Image (cartoon, rainbow, N blue to C red):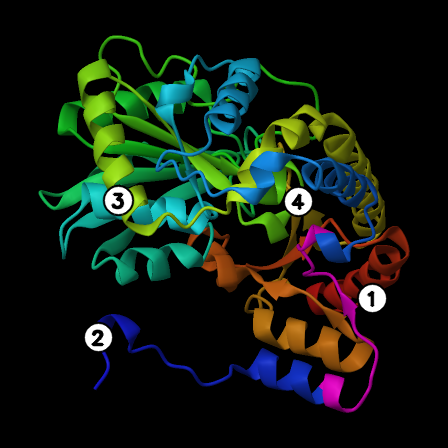
Amino acid sequence: MFARRASWDLSQNDLSRRLDARRAAGLPILDLTESNPTRCEFSSPARLLREALERLARDPNAERYLPDARGDPAARRAIAAYHGAQGGAPTPDHVLLTAGTSEAYAHLFRLLGDPADRVLVPSPSYPLFGFLAELEGLEAVPYMLRFRADSNEWRIDIDSLEAACDARTRAVVVVHPNNPTGGFMRTADLSRLRNLCARRELALVSDEVFADYALDAPSGEWPGTLLAGADAAGAPLTFVLSGVSKTLALPQLKLAWIVGAGPAPLRDEALARLEVIADTYLAVNGLGQLILPELLAGRAAVQAEILERVRRNRAHLRRALSARPGTTLLPADAGWCAIIRVRGTPGGPPPDEDALVAELLDGAGVLVQPGWFFDLSSNADEKSAHLVLSLLPAPDVFVAGVDAVCRICADAAR
């Protein structure tokens, strides 16, 4: 009765069953997977939103429905200015608003691919890509990101990416910086990737929702945005995605955008076709568009508060792991996640990620994510396990949870 694209296995996995049982028993849970900023005791996003809504209540435009398939002009001007500050050079005409980045992906996949076509997506990264592609009749094909121990950084395996290309490939997706690795794409890799996409006539899609959350000062090793240089001669058709869920820590607004770049005739035709797709749905909330310029103007306070939390929690995790042989905090350039590598015992098998996660939840009431959830297992040292933690939880929650994580991981590494 149901379409093949909706033929998912809806049964609960073991971790979900354990979590439900613990909640049903009324037992406490220290959730170190929490990535919803509205549940992490931040004050700046709520204050910024409240002030904008108070002014919106007095705006007569809030009482009218003024649909624009590309989005409110003032909102698009604010987005163009935001990316201009990152090093891009878009105009408001290059911007199209969407109801979240998932809808942005859906629009782009509809634009670029026919049924059974393929898009290349990074591994490790979001588990959502497979669902988004499948729902549009496309196939998400992974290419590898490799952790280089010699330079202590994550890099795109360009050879893996090119090997994954075939006649049905239509686009390459990058996440800049990646989630969960936190790695920005290096300038040298970007140059090779642009050449590959241009040569094979592939679109380049860059998800930059975490671009504002660099842990250290900007580095010349990576661009602030792939919009920088995207209009140069020989560049491929490029789309950059971002939104208020991460940029402003306001996921409840469901407001994101696509910025088009690349060869002008191709870019303009792509945006015109995207406008038809967007006009078919008109899903973007009008009130959110009206307050977006004010929200973006106030982003500095929001991002400063979140970065202070992320840096503080990451520093505590680094100190805690340094005293536990066999455990390592993998480096990151940016983002809201941390990856712990747990070495196996000498001569023995690697630790079992699911067993570690279950022991943490059942024994200590601490919830973390196994590395395989982000496909870290396909890129990992075969003698190691990986756990992924959010760096957003309030410090008291994070510190208590990390103490248990370090203890149990160290036991597994003995």
In the image, is residue 263 above or below residue 67? above
Using the image as rendered, state which of residue 69 and residue 189 is in the foreground.
Answer: 69
In the image, is residue 410 above or below residue 355? above
Check disc 4 and give the amino acid type: Trp
Distance Cα–Cα, label 3 vs label 1: 49 Å
User: What is the secondary structure assignment of the residue under circle 4?
Assistant: loop
Distance Cα–Cα, label 4 vs label 3: 32 Å
What residue does disc 1 label?
A: 404
User: Is 2 within the magenta?
Assistant: no
Check disc 1 and give the amino acid type: Ala
Q: Which of marks 4 and 3 is in front?
A: 3
User: Is 32 within the magenta?
Assistant: yes
Q: Nearer the viewer, mark 2 or mark 4?
A: 2
Check disc 3 and give the amino acid type: Ile
Chain-order first, disc 4 or disc 3: 3
What residue does disc 2 label?
A: 4
